[in-house]
Image (cartoon, helix red, strand yellow):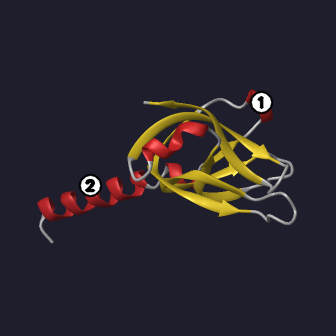
Amino acid sequence: MCKFCSTVLAGFLLAASLAGHAAGRVFRIDGDAAAPLTLSGTVVGPIAAGSKAEGTFSQIYHLKLRRPIWLDDGAVCGARRISSLALSQDDMARLKGRAVTIQARVFCQETRMVDYRLADIKML
């Protein structure tokens, strides 16, 4: 193989490995003290969850992430690979179907369904 081809191949393999580098990182969620994360994805929904009979039914918009991430609160929600996060803010319908980059605080919601959600959402 020529030296140029080897260099190009090595560069491609390095770039491919760096693209997925953050995907393996675990983001530690420390309750209300959690630092905001910058996330990119597409707003989808509304997605129905819960049970009407149990009073836990809700319809909420989600941020479908471009790449899954790992979150861990070290407690109830635990370590999970996340590809979609609920947007806990009322005005998300206007963003349905749009690719967005946001800054938000991730938290574990123990009421209703135990799951990670986004709050304090700011559009970037």
**Residue 23 spot, x, y in % from top left:** 53, 54
Tell me which amino acid carries mark 1: Asp
Q: Which residue is mark 1?
A: 32
- How busy is the neighbourhood of tag 1: few (under 14 within 10 Å), some, or many (20 plus)? few
**Residue 69 spot, x, y in % from top left:** 58, 53
Element under label 1? helix
- How busy is the neighbourhood of tag 2: few (under 14 within 10 Å), some, or many (20 plus)? few
Tell me what residue is drawn at x 79 percent, y 46 percent.
109
**Residue 103 spot, x, y in % from top left:** 53, 33
**Residue 11's disc number:** 2
Q: Is there a contact, CB below 8 Å, between mark 1 and mark 2?
A: no
Q: Foreground: 30 or 94?
A: 94
Tell me what residue is drawn at x 33 percent, y 53 percent.
15
For the N terminus, give its image quadrant. bottom left
Element under label 2? helix
Tell me which amino acid carries mark 2: Gly
Give the residue at the far bottom of this rendering. Answer: 1
**Residue 87's disc number:** none
Tell me what residue is drawn at x 77 percent, y 30 percent.
32
Q: Foreground: 112 or 20?
A: 112
**Of the residues tagged 1 and 2, which is closer to the observer?**
1
Q: Is residue 89 above or below residue 35?
A: below
For the C terminus, give its image quadrant. top left
